[in-house]
Amino acid sequence: MWQPQRLGGALLSLVSAVLLLLAPFLPLFIGSLSARGTEFTMTIDGWGFTTDAPQRIGAIAVNAYGLIFSAVVLFVATAVGVIGARRLATPRNRRAAAVLTAVAAAFTLGVTVAVLPQLTNWIDTFRPVGLASATVNTSIGLGFWLLVLGTVLALAAAVIAALPIRDREPVTPAYGFPMPLGHQEQPMQPAYQPQPAAEPAEPAAEPDKPVNPERQSDN
């Protein structure tokens, strides 16, 4: 009923969509600053940043909308992929699943590429101003790793959806009996084979007529 390879690709799209939906609500970057007995922490997620510092300066890009849109497209691609994973699915359904999964994977990759330079910038610029003895700690949050993993799974799902698949089921001919794999069709024998013409029989020799002894005695 199902084609395992295409069904596996649809499940990868589903897992990727869930990860991308969770990513903007988890930290992408975490930074902490310790100086003169005081410690401040800043956390950046897909919606902005939060900090316990006395002053909030600056702004960051909101990446949550792109991540949620990627998740929605992947959910749609999962539904279409499940339909295309049936053995009775039409080629049109399978092409639609492959195209939609590829579009979702491409958009997800674009969001990841856009977030990556922001992350490197956060790590490089998170430092104190005017405090030479401060201790700075930075780390990559769980949300970014979910984003990376979801992107990899989306790309894998797109590749699986685009691969051609050979049907291994036995071919069923018109009269309704499945032909086993590896069966070699034997040449059909004609229903009527002409017999060679029989040779004409030789005429049987006539038997000798009996001789009448009385007729011989008359002579």
Image (spheres, rainbow, N blue to C red):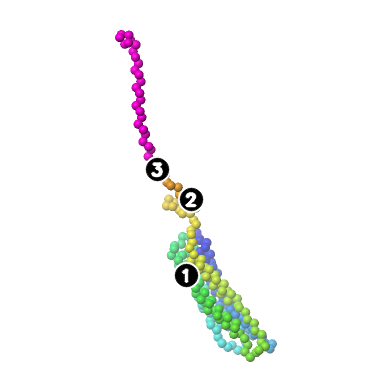
Q: Residue at x 53, y 66 (%)?
A: 11
**Mark 3 secondary-structure assignment:** loop
Q: CA distance from mark 3 to mark 1?
A: 54 Å
- Cβ atoms under marks 2 and 3 closer than 8 Å: no
Q: Earlier in the sequence, mark 2 or mark 1?
A: 1
| Front one among 150 and 126 | 126
Q: Which disc number belongs to residue 183? A: 2
Q: Which disc number belongs to residue 191? A: 3
**Mark 1 secondary-structure assignment:** helix
The residue under label 1 is 100
Dominant secondary-structure state across the stretch colored magenta: loop
**Viewer-nearest of discs 3 and 1:** 3
Percent position (x, y) of residue 59?
55, 85
Check the picture and name the quadrant holding the C terminus.
Answer: top left
Residue lying farthest top? 218
**Mark 2 secondary-structure assignment:** loop
- Cβ atoms under marks 3 and 1 closer than 8 Å: no
In the image, which residues are magenta? 192-219
Residue lying farthest bottom? 130
Q: CA distance from mark 2 to mark 1?
A: 39 Å
Percent position (x, y) of residue 175?
43, 50
Q: Which disc number belongs to residue 50? A: none
Left or right for 136, reference 165: right
| Front one among 161 and 57 | 161
Q: Amino acid at mark 1?
A: Leu
Q: CA distance from mark 2 to mark 3?
A: 22 Å
Q: How many marks?
A: 3
Q: Residue at x 48, y 66 (%)?
A: 162
